[in-house]
Image: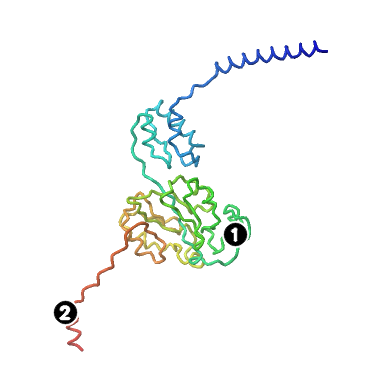
Amino acid sequence: MNNILIISLLVLGILGGVLAVILYFVAQKFKVEENPLIDEVAECLPGANCGGCGFAGCRALAEACVKSAAEKGNIDGLACPGTNMQTVADILHLTIAAAEPKIAVVRCNGSCANSPAKVHYEGADICAFANTLYAGEGGCSKGCLGLGDCTKKCPFNALHINKETGLPEVDEKKCVGCGACAKACPRGIIEIRPRGKNDRRVYVCCSNTDKGALVIKNCNVGCIGCQKCVKTCPFEAIEMRGNLAYIDPAKCKSCRKCEEVCPRGTIHAVNFPPRKPKAEEPVNQEVTNENKANA
């Protein structure tokens, strides 16, 4: 009995040793040498794996950068919204043009005050779920549901729901424009736009394409498609998308003329200094004297 046990152990030991040797040679034959630059590039990325770069994660982007640098001599088209890509370029001994920084913009101002609740929602605190059930407590089918899917997806903690307004607010110091919040919003009210010069932006704070009468019924500040802004813009930066005005950030010169003529206060100008009060028009003295004489 003991001899059988010893022989079994010897056979298993020899078999294990042979298989180990085979596996070693197979591993050496098919091993893949990884460029050490990949680790260096990955270390300078934020590690949030937000997907804003278009890849599955930060390491996948690092691999793509190193591969592109080796094969093409550049990293054109590759960018991480949370990292200065010049840092990556320095590691790879490349020079790149500075990318325009982006930021998330919540294109809805249907707060609790502007779009008073008509119904009360009781269900799962998930926007994607609530969106399949009803238009919203204020009745706007395109407005923010306020349940925070966007805040939960933000990897940089740059988005929070304001309890007073019921709307998400973007922390400009933390937001990198990765787009995770925009992808999470089932109604598409969050847009990734250029930060603008001196962080100044002009945009239509509404995403509702319904006709004006229906918009007025559900919201005090929604776009009614009057087109006054379109006619006023001297740079042709505003277009109508259905019944909704949209400002093209590439064409907008931030003159703010559209903001002045909007009857609903739907167009928002962010981070601009306060407007100077308009000077009173001079009184025509001749007309005044003539009126007095006639009196």
Name the residue that disc number 2 marks.
Answer: 286
Q: Position of residue 245 (x, y in %)?
A: 41, 58
**Dot 1: element:** loop
Badge 2 amino acid: Glu
Residue drawn at 39 percent across, 34 percent down? 88
Badge 1 amino acid: Tyr
On screen, residue 49 versus residue 264, left or right, reads right
Q: Quadrant of the N terminus?
A: top right
**Res 3 quadrant in image:** top right
Image height of 132 relative to 116, above or below: above
Q: Position of residue 246 (x, y in %)?
A: 41, 55
Name the residue that disc number 1 marks.
Answer: 134
Residue drawn at 61 percent across, 17 percent down? 23
Closer to the chain start, of discs 1 and 2, is: 1
Q: Position of residue 135 (x, y in %)?
A: 57, 60
On screen, residue 141 versus residue 75, left or right, reads right
User: How many C-alpha atoms fall within 10 Å of the one at disc 1: few (<14), some, or many (≥20)?
Assistant: some
Image height of 171 relative to 60, above or below: below
On screen, residue 210 versus residue 83, left or right, reads right
